């Protein structure tokens, strides 16, 4: 009987009252922190307003269960991560593309074309010495260092001048 009286006295003491109030305040702040964190996180992960409202309300009504459920169903990547991943894929696709743009008309042409099929602009030269293809703006072949072999017309003009 004495132990029961001690327990009753403990529950009726002001210290126990403060412990209960402190615990309730702590749980309230924790609940509010969970709702705020979930709200900020879902806004960074999706633009779907209906899903955002559903998840926030779920955590307002069912704090711990709602948080566990949210962690299971939330999108795996943030919108910023998706954006940068898309940029990376586009960059890699551009780097591995076998097509280039014509400097004159900006039409897409294959990397091994010597002339642009859209505007007939000479885009690249083929080296007469090593058979590598190089940009026509280069004076010499970057692979072997030989200058472009003069055409027959250029040779004839040189001979006529002599």
Image: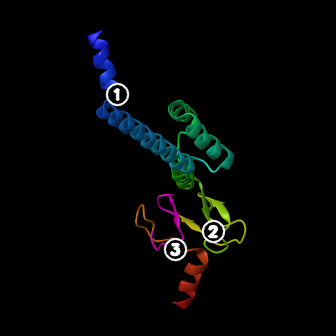
Residue 29: name its quadrant: top left
| In the image, residue 106 above or below residue 87 | below
Label whose residue precedes the other's in the sequence (1 or 3): 1
87 vs 108, left or right, is left
Q: Dot 3 corresponds to which residue?
A: 137
Q: Residue furthest bottom?
A: 161
Label whose residue precedes the other's in the sequence (2 or 3): 2
Q: Dot 2 corresponds to which residue?
A: 102
Q: Residues within 10 Å of mark 2 (few under 14, many from 20)?
A: many
For the residues carrying marks 1 and 2, which lies nearer the camera in this image? 1
Q: Residue furthest top?
A: 1
Looking at the magenta stretch, what is its main secondary structure? Answer: loop
For the residues carrying marks 2 and 3, which lies nearer the camera in this image? 2
Measuring from the top left, give residue 17's x and y in whole percent.
35, 34
Between residues 144 and 57, which one lies in front from this camera angle? 57
Q: Residues within 10 Å of mark 3 (few under 14, many from 20)?
A: few
131 vs 9, left or right, is right
Q: CA distance from mark 2 to mark 3?
A: 13 Å
Q: Dot 1 corresponds to which residue?
A: 12
| In the image, residue 54 above or below residue 65 | below
In the rendered structure, does residue 13 fall within the stretch colored magenta? no
Measuring from the top left, give residue 150's x and y in whole percent.
53, 74
Specify start and end residues of the magenta stretch as a single range.
127-140
């Amino acid at each position: 009987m004495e132990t029961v009286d001690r327990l009753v006295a403990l529950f009726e003491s002001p210290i126990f009252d403060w412990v209960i109030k402190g615990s309730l305040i702590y749980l309230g702040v924790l609940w509010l922190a969970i709702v705020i964190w979930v709200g900020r996180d879902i806004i960074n992960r999706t633009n779907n307003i209906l899903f955002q409202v559903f998840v926030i309300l779920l955590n307002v009504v069912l704090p711990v269960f709602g948080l566990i459920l949210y962690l299971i169903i939330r999108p795996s990547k943030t919108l910023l991560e998706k954006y940068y991943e898309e940029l990376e894929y586009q960059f890699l696709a551009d780097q591995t593309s076998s097509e280039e743009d014509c400097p004159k008309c900006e039409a897409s042409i294959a990397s091994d074309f010597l002339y642009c099929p859209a505007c007939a602009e000479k885009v690249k030269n083929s080296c007469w010495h090593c058979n590598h293809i190089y940009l026509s703006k280069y004076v010499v072949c970057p692979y072997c260092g030989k200058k472009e072999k003069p055409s027959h017309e250029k040779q004839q003009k040189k001979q006529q001048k002599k």
